[in-house]
Amino acid sequence: MSTKAKARPATAPVVFTANRLRDGRVVWLGTEGAWRDRITETTPFTPEASDQGLALAQQGERAQLVVGVYAVEVDPNGGLGGPTPLKFRERLRVQGPSVAAEAA
C-alpha cells in the first residue's frame, strides 16, 4: 500500500490546476473558486496563502467538478500575458493537449 506524497511548502506564488471531470481538460482555479480554461484568468496565491487557495480548490473536487487538484508555482509576471509556470510540465499543460483528440 502506498502513502500519499507530502507536498513541499511553496516558495513562489502558486495557482491551482486540475482536470475537469466532464471532459478531462486542464483547468485553472480562478477567482472565487470558478474553474477557468486559461491560466491567464487566475490570480496567484502568495506562498503564505497557498493553504487557503488549496482549500478553495478542493471545494471543486468535493462538488465533483474537477479531479486531481494541485498547486503550480508560477512567475506572476511571466511571458504568457499572466502567470507562467516555473516547470516545463506545467507550461506544456497551459498550451493544451499535446495530441489532438481527432487524431487519437
Image (cartoon, rainbow, N blue to C red):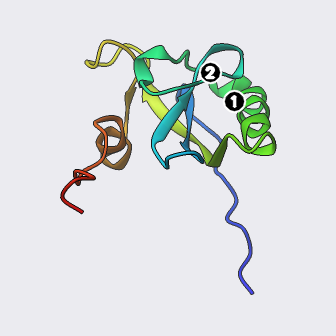
Picture layout, residue 61 above or below residue 1:
above
78 relative position to 57: left or right:
left
Q: Which quadrant is the N terminus positioned in?
A: bottom right
Give the residue at x 41% y 17%. Answer: 40
Q: Position of residue 59 (x, y in %)?
A: 79, 35
Q: Position of residue 71 (x, y in %)?
A: 58, 40
Between 43 and 23, the residue placed more toward the observer is 23
49 relative position to 89: left or right:
right
Picture layout, residue 4 above or below residue 14:
below
Find the distance from the CA under tag 2 to the CA under tag 1. 6 Å
Q: Residues at badges 2 and 1 in contact (C-beta under 8 Å)?
A: yes
User: Circle 1 is placed at which residue position?
Assistant: 50
Give the residue at x 37% y 13%. Answer: 77
Which numbered marker is on residue 76?
none
Q: Position of residue 38 (x, y in %)?
A: 41, 24
User: Circle 2 is placed at which residue position?
Assistant: 45
Give the mark nearer the N terminus: 2 vs 1.
Answer: 2
